[in-house]
């Protein structure tokens, strides 16, 4: 069952729903989710609002959804390289698995995740959809 902690959820609100990461002041490396220690050793970061634009590095189709997502049936997961550098694993929405391809340009969108059992509360979050520019396969 999905464990929902309102305090924890609130703290992660900006990061989770607005794709807010951090950028190292010393070397410029971007992170999402945020970190407190860069690979270069620096602990100084500035907030970074990620654009939500990226490209698909790899993907797979899940036939056995985890609890809470079972009502979705089969769905696709991808690893996306965001334009600003960080990689993120996310669900792909509004996609035809047969048309997915590595390098496909995708965009983050706000979509329904699941409905909590006890009060029928709908939880939303970010998923990625192909952009119009990437509708066809590369030559
Ligand atoms: Zn750094």
Image (tube, helix red, strand yellow):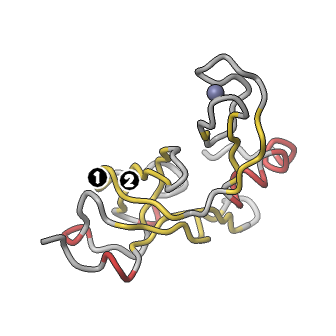
Residue drawn 63% across and 65% down?
115
Q: Position of residue 9 (x, y in %)?
A: 79, 48
Pointer 2 residue Cβ closer than 8 Å to ligand 1: no
Q: Residues within 10 Å of mark 2 (few under 14, many from 20)?
A: many
Q: Residues within 10 Å of mark 1 (few under 14, many from 20)?
A: some
Q: Which residue is mark 1?
A: 60
Residue drawn 30% across and 53% down?
59
Q: Which residue is mark 2?
A: 78
Are the residues at dot 1 and dot 2 in contact (C-beta closer than 8 Å)?
yes
Secondary structure of residue under mark 2: strand
Q: Position of residue 30 (x, y in %)?
A: 61, 41
Residue, far bottom: 132
Residue, far front: 26
Residue, far top: 41
Q: Quadrant of the N terminus?
A: top right
Q: Quadrant of the C terminus?
A: bottom left
The answer to whether 125 appears left or right of 82 in the picture is right
Q: Position of residue 111 (x, y in %)?
A: 58, 71
**Res 108 quadrant in image:** bottom right
The answer to whether 26 appears left or right of 9 in the picture is left
Q: Position of residue 29 (x, y in %)?
A: 59, 36
Q: Is residue 32 placed above or below 20 in the rendered structure?
A: above
The image quadrant where one finds ligand 1 is: top right
Q: Earlier in the sequence, mark 1 or mark 2?
A: 1
The answer to whether 134 appears left or right of 12 in the picture is left
Pointer 1 residue Cβ closer than 8 Å to ligand 1: no
Q: Give the number of the disc on residue 130.
A: none
Q: Is residue 22 placed above or below 125 in the rendered structure?
A: above
Secondary structure of residue under mark 1: strand
Residue drawn 78% across and 41% down?
46
């Amino acid at each position: 069952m999905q464990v929902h902690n309102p305090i924890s959820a609130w703290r992660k609100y900006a990061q989770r729903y607005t794709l807010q990461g951090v950028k190292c002041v010393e070397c410029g490396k971007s992170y999402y989710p945020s970190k407190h220690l860069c690979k270069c050793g620096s602990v100084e970061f500035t907030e970074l609002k990620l654009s939500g634009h990226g490209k698909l590095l790899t993907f797979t189709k899940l036939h056995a959804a985890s609890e809470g997502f079972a009502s979705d049936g089969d769905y696709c997961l991808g690893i996306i390289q965001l334009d600003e550098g960080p990689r993120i694993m996310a669900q792909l929405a509004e996609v035809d698995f047969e048309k997915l391809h590595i390098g496909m340009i995708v965009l983050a969108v706000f979509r329904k995740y699941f409905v909590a059992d006890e009060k029928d509360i709908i939880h939303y979050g970010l998923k990625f959809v192909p952009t119009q520019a990437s509708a066809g396969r590369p030559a």
